[in-house]
Image (cartoon, rainbow, N blue to C red):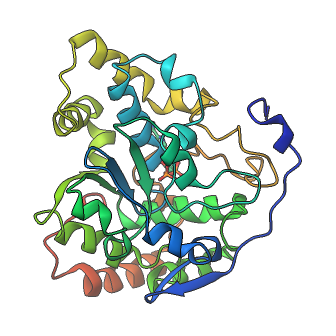
Amino acid sequence: MELDYHPELRDLTIRRPQLKLLEDVPLPDWVVDNWEMVKNFQAKPDDLLIATYPKSGTTWTQEIVDLINQNGDGKMCKQAPVYERIPFLEFFMDKYPPGIELIEKMASPRVIKTHLPIQLVPKSFWEQDCKTLVVARNAKDCLVSHFHYQRMAQLLPEPGTWSEFFQKFMDGQMSWGSWYDHVKGWWEAKNKHRILFLFYEDIKENRRREILKLAEFMEKVLEEDVIEKIVHLSSFEVMKDNPMTNYTTVPIGVMDQNISRFMRKGEVGDWKNHFTVAQNEDFDEHYERQMGHSSLKFRNVL
Ligand code: A3P
């Protein structure tokens, strides 16, 4: 795995964080310890916020949004890793510039990533009536993707064993809190703010259709050849081999992709390779209790 982007960081290793509670939401300590800066962040009216629960297709969406903004010009999107082109609002790590510092240096219109649940999003986003793009992924695949990611990413706590992690997910003892509360919170807000709510499974099913929805939300009109370029450049195969989207620019002491690749499988239904029959029954029962009354319905869950 070549690191040619920030060679001075090649040997960087970090300690795994603890989770700390912020308004009852567990977050990595590096978020909570810097909370005043996040809370006081000043949004601008033309900022676009990409809000996701971790492992729901955030990077995929970031790349599509940047490709739309760059009119399908893949070279422009290769000028920097995706996490610098679309910075992570609540990101703070030694040696790296904080997400907020990168955002403040950007020219408008800015695109910003967050994993925060809606109630923790800095209020300036709503005061400025910013648009938000929410992407959600079915809970079971999200859990599986999260487990493998936590094994390799030192940015998050140790995942423990598969069965321990499985229980933690159901209990909401996860970084950025409960998946159930997170997706329901954003879903319920979608008529109060300018929110486009997309699903990982829909993008997987028909990327072109979802790209067009996104472009419309961003008020961009795309020529046919540009649409084709964006569809191609946002495929799993292309993004897997693109160092500016596959996170291989991150030092091994932060993300060890020998343990698990960031661009791991990119599939719907991989949970079937992980859940035991008993786990699946427990999960379904718990899921029904958490989500049964919500109008938010995911496909490919059962
Ligand atoms: P898997 O671990 O299931 O492979 P996030 O960016 O929110 O951390 O989400 C990462 C997940 O999105 C990973 O899922 C990754 O493979 C998947 N992903 C990223 N780019 C993708 C693409 N172009 N097509 C399909 N899945 C993609």
Please tell me how many numbered marks the rendered image carries. Answer: 0
**Position of residue 45 in the picture relative to residue 11 (left or right):** left
Q: Nearer the viewer, residue 188 or 296?
A: 188
Extreme residue toward the top, this view: 225
Q: Which of 194 and 160 is in front in this view?
A: 194
> Residue 253, image x and y in percent?
82, 54
**Position of residue 94 in the picture relative to residue 148 (left or right):** right
Task: Using the rendered view, name the quadrant where residue 61 is placed.
Answer: top left
Q: Which of 262 and 188 is in front in this view?
A: 188
Quarter of the image that includes the C terminus: bottom left
**Position of residue 234 in the picture relative to residue 198 (left or right):** right
Quarter of the image that includes the N terminus: top right
> Residue 244, image x and y in percent?
60, 31
Can residue 15 be spotted in the picture? Answer: yes
Residue sitting at 66 percent across and 51 percent down?
97
Position of 265 relative to 123 (above/below): above
> Residue 291, image x and y in percent?
24, 79
Position of 49 relative to 1 (above/below): below
> Residue 183, image x and y in percent?
30, 69
Position of 43 relative to 19 (above/below): above
Task: Using the rendered view, name the quadrant where residue 122 is placed.
Answer: bottom left
Position of 275 relative to 73 (above/below): below
